């Protein structure tokens, strides 16, 4: 189908009397037919991205844009009296949790955009990440029935279904293909589990509660399920094309493991070669070594999958046996390398009756990569230091990125047009040209200020509609939107806001430019402290928003159900991006990049990709504060007493005491006292304030106030913001994907 034919069919589409849902499905189906007609270049080698999460968001607008028909569709619908924005009613496909899942979606977009053959493999969850409502200040979780409107962007491949076997059940894995449109059409293949009730459970929920034995087994089943379906299929395809020989398997396939969740794919791959094709063990291991590569996303121990050996044995006895065999081979290798006992145990696949997926991935993976410069250095210095000593050649850095198509062109048409008018449109197909803006900043600051005001207004309208809160147009927007976690320190932002509020009340903070703090975050359902922080922020918001003395200057909004579509509004309308994790703990962050590209300054710590952001956009154009990694390490070893810091500083006393002195109510749950104790007393498993909130709080408040003062010089502040946009090309996932393609995958377009 030609573009003109798509347009013609769209023009002929009857719209009268149809529901949004019907129109959505009909237009999407037309676009699918149109999109899939494109001729594909044959591929020699494919890369496969195995990921437990793909946080794709809404496909409708993005796919129409990628197919080059978004503007025409908007116009044709307008002629029929339909505002294209009605399709914002359609649920996001929230088949992921946060950064890791969004990264997977950005990678697929970039690979298709660059014409590189990268295919995704994951799970087609019946329910995505829960929908969040805030009731009484508390998070409430509702099921996310994302297919409620239909799923016109997927194709069920009935005749490519497979069987996945566990000791106690047999499951059918049915593939659903979502095309990824771009210069080439790649495929995200999501497996749906079918069979009896138990079998179906495997693809029912993303991250089912795993605080019980049963929950852990289900999680293990999920990970094996999609990994096994993927490698089983790849091996079969290879045999069909090249016969039952595998020495050349890695010439045609490379498999990237997105974190530790799909690492069982390695064991399954080796198992199949041995059991079904009589490859000997050491040859099978060698082939796996050329095929798999591993990306680490976190150094937090709780997020590195470890499986209880007994559980693996129970439902996957052959995988258990294979893991033990790999463990014994590893021991032999370590003996040859003369590793000490301690070193061997550091790198062991099997120890204390558990299998370490990270150690398996490092042992077999041809490469191991971190996701920002600092993070990769931390992997080499601490988490994988022993492995780095013995296998230094495996380690690489691949700083994350975001797709400028969704995160600039789609979410910020106004800024994109300003860029077009300034440097021409070529940046849209070659993002590296964006740096051309650097030579034109003084000429366009006024226009930029106007664009920011438009995007801010759109955000405020959206917030008004969804949260019922009014924000005046002249308010500066500071945003902290990301998963709720103690290390991300949303609580520190809440304290900083309270200190500014106090300053406004007692007159020590003067000439304050009106500002709103926007929070958005979901907490894991079982993470008590994170939920307490949500409640606390909402209490702070209620108090401040209703204080007539200060609410002309300071407001706080906690948006409900933060997701990709909400993020698209927030990143475009924000002036100040809050990226304040404890140094050393945010592997990269990608939210920080979205904000930078949309012309927000970063107020943040020297952590993750923030370091590279300020390196490229200039420290003078951003606001860095707080302890750096070596200082945090020093505090950990030499002692750190948050209670003393609190006693010494009246503002800190005010803010932290607000948790327990009756200023705010936690609804009688005691959850605020728990937060207080975590900061001041500690807990059985950690010292007080192990994320160093009190240490960084004062410099944080100072940075926020400095930004507020600098903002008054509109031209100079807009210049800082534009410097961020102009230097953000490095954070395009196009750049990241080119690096993976050239340095790990060896694939070409
Ligand atoms: C980008 C994004 C994230 C990741 O944000 P970080 O600030 O990097 O943690 C999480 N959730 C959504 C919906 C996103 O779009």
Image (cartoon, rainbow, N blue to C red):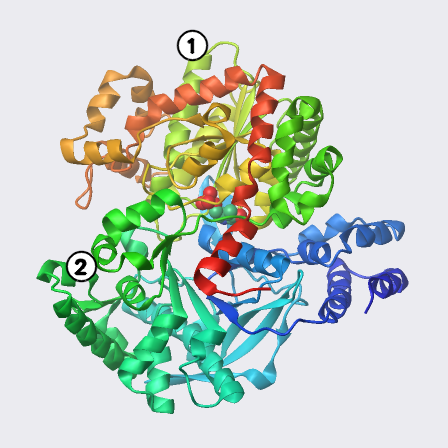
Q: Secondary structure at mark 1?
A: helix
Picture disc at residue 208: none
Q: Position of residue 231 (x, y in %)?
A: 44, 77
Q: Which residue is mark 2?
A: 346
Q: Which residue is mark 1?
A: 506
> In screen coordinates, is 646 left or right of 86?
left
> In screen coordinates, is 229 left or right of 720?
left
The front one of 636 and 96 is: 636
The front one of 446 and 317 is: 446
> Compared to 354, does 634 lie above or below?
above
Q: Is residue 747 visible?
A: yes
Crowding at dot 2, Cα within 10 Å, few <14 / some 14-19 / many 20+, comes out as some
Q: Secondary structure at mark 2?
A: helix
Q: Position of residue 181 (x, y in %)?
A: 66, 62
- Sequence order check, earlier mark of 2 and 1: 2
Q: Are marks 2 and 1 in contact (CB under 8 Å)?
A: no
Determine the residue positioned at 65% across, 39% down. 462
């Amino acid at each position: 189908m030609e573009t003109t034919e798509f347009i013609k069919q769209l023009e002929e589409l009857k719209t009268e009397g149809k529901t949004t849902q019907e129109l959505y499905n009909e237009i999407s189906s037309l676009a699918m037919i149109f999109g899939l007609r494109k001729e594909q270049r044959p591929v020699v080698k494919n890369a496969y991205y195995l990921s437990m999460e793909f946080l794709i968001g809404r496909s409708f607008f993005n796919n129409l844009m990628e197919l080059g028909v978004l503007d025409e569709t908007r116009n044709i619908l307008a002629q029929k009296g339909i505002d294209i924005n009605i399709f914002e009613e359609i649920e996001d496909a929230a088949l992921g949790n946060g950064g890791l899942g969004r990264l997977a979606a950005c990678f697929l977009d970039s690979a298709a955009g660059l014409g590189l053959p990268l295919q995704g493999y994951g799970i087609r969850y019946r329910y995505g990440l829960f929908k969040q409502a805030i009731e009484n200040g508390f998070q409430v979780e509702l099921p996310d029935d994302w297919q409620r409107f239909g799923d016109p962007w997927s194709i069920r491949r009935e005749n490519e279904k497979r069987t996945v076997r566990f000791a106690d059940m047999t499951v059918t894995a049915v593939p659903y293909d979502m095309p990824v449109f771009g210069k080439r059409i790649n495929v995200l293949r999501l497996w749906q589990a079918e069979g009896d009730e138990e079998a179906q459970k495997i693809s029912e929920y993303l991250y089912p509660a795993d605080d019980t034995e049963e929950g852990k087994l289900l999680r293990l089943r999920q990970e094996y399920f999609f990994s096994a379906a993927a490698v089983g299929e790849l091996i079969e395809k290879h045999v069909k094309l090249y016969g039952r020989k595998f020495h050349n398997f890695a010439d045609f396939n490379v498999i990237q493991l997105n974190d530790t969740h799909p690492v069982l794919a390695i064991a399954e791959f080796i198992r199949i070669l041995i059991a079904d094709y009589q490859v000997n063990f050491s040859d099978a291991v060698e082939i796996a070594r050329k095929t798999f590569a591993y990306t680490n996303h976190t150094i937090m121990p709780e997020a590195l999958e470890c499986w209880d050996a007994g559980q693996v044995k129970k439902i996957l006895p052959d995988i258990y046996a294979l893991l033990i065999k790999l463990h014994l081979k590893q021991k032999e290798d370590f003996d040859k390398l003369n590793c000490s006992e301690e070193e061997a145990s550091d790198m062991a696949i099997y120890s204390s009756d558990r299998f370490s997926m990270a150690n398996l991935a490092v042992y077999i993976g041809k490469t191991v990569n971190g996701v920002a410069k600092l993070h990769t250095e931390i992997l080499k210095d601490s988490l994988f230091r022993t492995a780095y000593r013995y296998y230094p050649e495996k380690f690489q850095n691949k700083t994350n990125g975001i797709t400028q198509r969704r995160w600039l062109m789609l979410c910020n048409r106004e800024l994109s047009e300003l860029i077009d008018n300034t440097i021409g449109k070529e940046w849209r197909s070659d993002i590296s040209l964006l740096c051309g803006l650097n030579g034109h900043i003084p000429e366009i600051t006024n226009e930029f200020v106007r664009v920011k005001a438009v995007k801010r207004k759109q955000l405020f309208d959206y917030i008004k509609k969804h949260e019922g809160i009014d924000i005046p147009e002249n308010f500066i927007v500071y945003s902290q939107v990301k998963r709720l976690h103690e290390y991300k320190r949303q609580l520190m932002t809440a304290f900083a806001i309270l200190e500014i509020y106090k300053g406004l009340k007692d007159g020590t903070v003067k000439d304050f430019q009106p500002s709103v703090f926007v929070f958005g975050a979901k907490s894991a359902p079982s993470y008590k402290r994170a939920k307490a922080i949500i409640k606390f922020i909402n209490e702070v918001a209620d108090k401040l928003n209703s204080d007539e003395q200060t609410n002309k200057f300071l407001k706080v909004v906690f948006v409900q159900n933060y997701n990709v579509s909400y993020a698209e509004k927030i990143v475009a309308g924000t002036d100040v991006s809050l990226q304040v994790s404890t140094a050393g703990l945010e592997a990269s962050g990608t939210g920080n990049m979205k904000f930078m590209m949309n012309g927000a300054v970063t107020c943040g710590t020297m952590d993750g990709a923030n370091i590279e952001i300020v390196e490229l956009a200039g420290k003078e154009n951003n606001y860095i504060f707080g302890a750096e990694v070596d200082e945090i390490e020093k505090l950990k070893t030499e002692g750190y007493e948050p209670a003393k810091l609190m006693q010494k500083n009246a503002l800190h006393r005010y803010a932290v005491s607000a948790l327990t002195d009756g200023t705010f109510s936690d609804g009688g749950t005691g959850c605020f006292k728990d937060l207080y104790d975590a900061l001041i007393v500690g807990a059985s498993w950690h010292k007080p304030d192990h994320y160093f909130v009190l240490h960084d709080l004062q410099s944080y408040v100072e940075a926020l106030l400095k930004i507020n003062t600098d903002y008054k010089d509109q031209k100079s502040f807009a210049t800082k913001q534009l410097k961020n946009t102009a230097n953000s090309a490095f954070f395009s996932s196009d750049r990241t994907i080119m690096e993976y393609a050239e340095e790990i995958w060896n694939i070409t377009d």
